[in-house]
Image: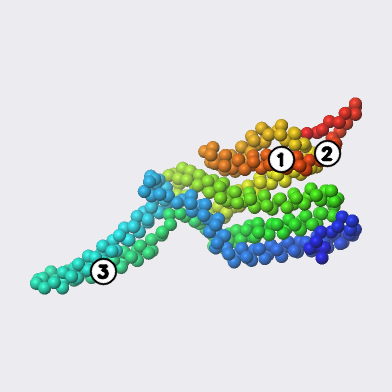
Amino acid sequence: MTAIRPVGHEDRLSLIEHLDELRTRLILCLVAFVLAFSLCYWQNDRILNWVNQPLEHAHRVDCGKKQIKDPLERSACYDKATKAYFDAAAPTLDRQAELLAKIAREPGVPPDLRADAAATGRASEALARTARAASAATPRATGRQPVTLGVTEPFVTTVTVAAYAALLLALPFILWQAYAFVLPAFTREERRTALPLMALIPVLFIAGVAFGYFLALPRAVAFLQNFNDNAFDILLQAKDYYRFSVLLLAVMGLLFQIPVGVLAIVRLGVVSTATLRRSRGYAIVLFAIVAAVVTPTPDPFTMLIAMAPLVVLFELSIWLARIFEPTGPSRWSFHDEDGLEDELD
């Protein structure tokens, strides 16, 4: 039962009981991950489709308005034009076959012309069927998907992506188990600080992942995959693409933990909100550097998109930290020889 509810601060457990509790909580975390993995592996086609969408949009081109240089994109435009031709040719050939059949049935038509019209009409019908079959076989999408090279890579990559998705899905429960295990070390006053922080971590992480998926990842993939594309046949290996996507989304999720870090250091008395306000300029420069690294695109608009939520979160963190800021002397302060207290900011 201790694995379901936290152990009280007043409870006294032996080392063996602590290890037993840790084992039980690890087993529960493993069970939660296995259940989440089973669900994600069952729906792996949907998950792969979601992850592939930024890549498909990056290679989706407007064949009528853009001068295509990438050979693979030109091939996709050729397929699109070929399909349009077959779609237009099939009804024309059907109409031609009907007219030739009508000519062949008209009275007074010479026998040789009648036979020629009937034969040409049958050939037109066959060509119409061929055009429809070719149109149905022509690829409809101009976007591309990542490629696999090894024999086992499709299976291994699918399992890996499903595992990442399962970890994200099971994260709230895993964090709760971690919090419940370390909770007995906190006093009642410290729990008031720890509980909101632990509750914020999964919420902010999911918000960061959502921001990265809908805004940062598509723009980063679009820039990197179309950079100097006239000099390369761009084929992206699946494991490299998914590794890049997971890393980018994980970094965005971690960057969204700024409020947790700010609240923690203010609550512990490491720094004050006044110090954070004075350091606002340095923080903005740091956020600009991080945004430039996370979204490696040359246009400033993309960097501002990634930078704006970080600045907003930092300002909200300072505002929230003022509410939870402890009063009295800081535990990180010292006294000089005159007995004056100086804070280590």
Indicate the position of residue 167 as horizontal and vertical percent values. Answer: 66, 58
Question: What label sits on residue 74 in the rendered view?
Answer: none
Secondary structure state at the residue bearing disc 2: loop
Q: In which quarter of the image is residue 275?
A: top right
Distance, label 2 to label 3, CA atoms, is 89 Å
Residue closest to the eye, 191 or 245: 191
Identify residue for label 1.
319
Tell me which label, 2 or 3, sits earlier in the chain.
3
Tell me which label, 2 or 1, sits earlier in the chain.
1
Question: What label sits on residue 327 in the rendered view?
Answer: 2
Distance, label 2 to label 1, CA atoms, is 16 Å
Secondary structure state at the residue bearing disc 1: helix
Secondary structure state at the residue bearing disc 3: helix
Residue 250 can be seen, yes or no: no
Question: What label sits on residue 125 in the rendered view?
Answer: 3
Indicate the position of residue 303 as horizontal and vertical percent values. Answer: 57, 40
Amino acid marked by disc 1: Trp
